Image (spheres, helix red, strand yellow):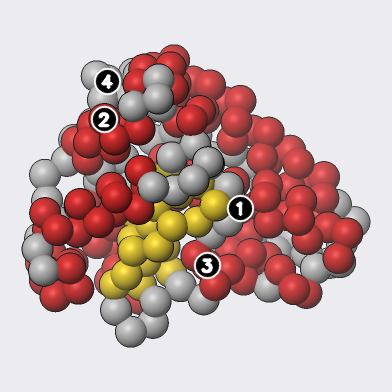
Amino acid sequence: MAYSVPPLPYPYDALEPHIDKATMEFHHDKHHQAYVDKANGALEGTEWAERPVEQVLQNLDGLPADKRTAVKNNGGGHYNHSLFWESMSASGGGAPDGELASAIDTAFGSFEDFKSKLKETGVNQFGSGWSWLVHDGSGLAIVGSANQDNPISQGSTPLLGVDVWEHAYYLKYQNRRPDYIDAWWNVVLWSKVAERFAAVS
């Protein structure tokens, strides 16, 4: 079954003032749709066309060589953005609790140190990309990825990612990527991150 853009789990303006309505409309309806269309086009007629995007991204080397880059870029864009929309909420923000909070403290020293490291990774990502909290099989780690690359292709499980492509923030924040990341913390849905953590820990 061909991929499709999942509906936003909230109205376009739900994340105001932190993420503006116009950005959400363009980001979700135009950018994500383009990734889906191109991923479907690249996979059409291959044995991978009916497989979940996670499985495809975990097995990029198994794809036909002439399809690999298009699928990595556009399948990755679909997967990354699907996680991104789910990771935010108008009722988000604050801090995690329970086992996720304990794991963050163990891995990074404190929640504030974790936030600083994720932000630093995002701010310093050259060009377009993402900053991720992942479970790498032994514990939590922070990694950056270029373009629409995803940690799942490297054997890690993404738990939370912040999109640092300019299209994610430029209408409101222009070139102020650090300000965008600071604002984004106010909409992070920690219950969804904890759910992903529980599934792999």
Q: Which mark is residue 76?
A: 1
Where is mark 2, residue-wise? 179
Q: CA distance from mark 2 to mark 3?
A: 28 Å
Q: Give, as a three-letter code, the residue at label 2.
A: Asp
Q: CA distance from mark 4 to mark 3?
A: 30 Å
Q: Earlier in the sequence, mark 2 or mark 3?
A: 3
Q: Give, as a three-letter code, the residue at label 1.
A: Gly
Where is mark 4, residue-wise? 16
Q: Quadrant of residue 71?
A: bottom right
Q: Give, as a three-letter code, the residue at label 3.
A: Ile
Q: Secondary structure at mark 1?
A: helix
Q: Position of residue 36 (x, y in %)?
A: 68, 41
Q: CA distance from mark 2 to mark 4?
A: 14 Å
Q: Secondary structure at mark 2?
A: helix
Q: Secondary structure at mark 3?
A: helix
Q: Which mark is residue 152?
A: 3
